[in-house]
Amino acid sequence: MDVRKEIIDFFQKNGMLIQPDAVELIIERGGVRECYGILERMEEKPLIVSADIIRRYLTEDFAEKTTAASRKEVFVVQEEKVRRGDFKILRDVTGNSTCEGKIEDFVQLFRNRFEKLSAFLRKRQEMRNAVPIKKALRSSEEIATIGIVREVVSSSNGVVVEIEDEEESMKVFVPKNVDSMIVQDEVIGVVGKKKGDLFIVKSVVRPEIPVERRKNVSDIEEYVLFLSDLHVGSKSFLDKEWERFIEWINGRKGNERQREVSKKVKYVVVCGDDVEGVGIYPGQEEDLIIEDLYEQYEELAKKLEGIPPEIKILLQPGNHDAVRPALPQPAFEKEIRDLFSHLNITFVGNPCYFKIGETVVLAYHGQSIQDFATYIPNMNQNQPTKIMREMLKRRHMAPIYGSISSLAPEKEDFMVIDVVPDIFVTGHVHVTAVEQYRDVILLNASAWQSQTEYQRMMNFMPDPAKAIVVNLRTLMPSIISFT
Ligand SMILES: [Fe+2]
């Protein structure tokens, strides 16, 4: 058995939810055998086991422990009345689409992207004195300029990149050791100098997110739970595991502490591919147990009926769902929404920014994860949080036009990361991943479908039937497995 899974299971069996960094610490300091000692030395069992808690009980550190009293205060489980933080959608294409489907509108989309992202770049120290490309072309001094990447051509020692602003374009040479991760249609700043006819880049600057910022936390302990890729209607939907999840969320399964968490879940976010859909890939009919799209949504409604009605469900579409495939995707149309009218559901678009209490969440199905994996060296779709970092650095979720994920010619670019979220969640690649980048929690929510033949071909390595819960008071994520 995988050592990480073994450690997670060990703590789960003992009524605790262990955080990913705590698992890594245990592996680093001796592995699974350390778990027994840690458990023995614990005076009280905390609900959430953080790396800090593990550090207190590791063999070599235990002798010089703090007093019992100071240890105890870590484990005080807050007995607070749970009230629901206010929910608000901050940004969503639903009802705000300006797309007429005209090819000329792409000009407007890219202009808007350039405006938004160059404004972020101008705030960067290195770009304070950035000049338009027209001026950079005439200069022989070291100079900074900003452009949208039109073309990237690899050479043996770097890439030749064509950048463009509102009036001019220029070719720049980026040596391999300066940056090898430039993708088409992202907006970058370059600092460099002309050498003969070629502009040699010394550094590439990206819009980026701040190193530090104030986290927007709730003053009460409540949880938001993330799911994705249910694929209801597929023969590979994990029925038994879903039933276990429903039992747990109703407080009927799991030990006392796990049940305590389930009682405090106030929101369930489903990040797309809610149903399997029809005609999504060649030969999909073979994989369907429900062949009619509407019946798939009816079945999804039945599945979601198991979630207690006081929990609000946010339902987002993905590439398998019954909305336009191009990004950004609006929420479901009325005829689908009506199938869920008896449930406590808010339908959102993809992507969607929303706020729970003070916490800002950016939920995005994640279609472009595969584009990043294709165009950036050493990126892998099975490590989505690594790719989500690249999205945050570029302040853009899907820069590459004309690749796997398609973009709609909206007049405003909804894929720009205008606001830095507290939680950034994706799905789509069917793995479960938790990470932090700067002060943003990155999550890839698990799927509820086992590996299909098509996914095997596409190199999808699923890690299904897990729920990620985030405590909105601490923004600490934990994974609960239902396998
Ligand atoms: Fe999916």
Image: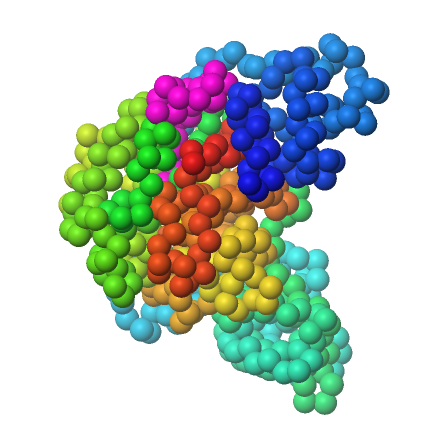
Residue 379 picture location, percent across and down: 57, 61
| Nearer-the-camera pick, 83 or 207 | 83
Task: Point out residue 273 in the picture as x, y percentages from the top left corner.
Answer: 33, 49
Q: Quadrant of the N terminus?
A: top right
Tell me where residue 426 appears, x and y as whole percent: 45, 48
From the viewer's perspective, tell me whether residue 284 is left or right of residue 89: left
Q: Quadrant of the C terminus?
A: top left
At x 21%, y 40%, the residue is: 299
Q: Which residues are drawn in magenta? A: 247-270
Q: Residue at x 54, y 53 (%)?
A: 383
Taking the spot 42% from the left edge, 33% from the top edge, the residue there is 482
Vertical arrangement, residue 206 with respect to residue 235, above or below: below
What's the residue at 49%, 44% (across, down)? 432
Is residue 399 visible in this depiction of the protein? no
Quadrant in which residue 11 is drawn = top right
Left or right: 169, with 44 as reference point: left
- Is 149 a magenta residue? no
Query: Based on the displayed image, in which of its 4 quarters is residue 412 positioned?
Result: bottom left
- Please say which color scheme the image uses: rainbow
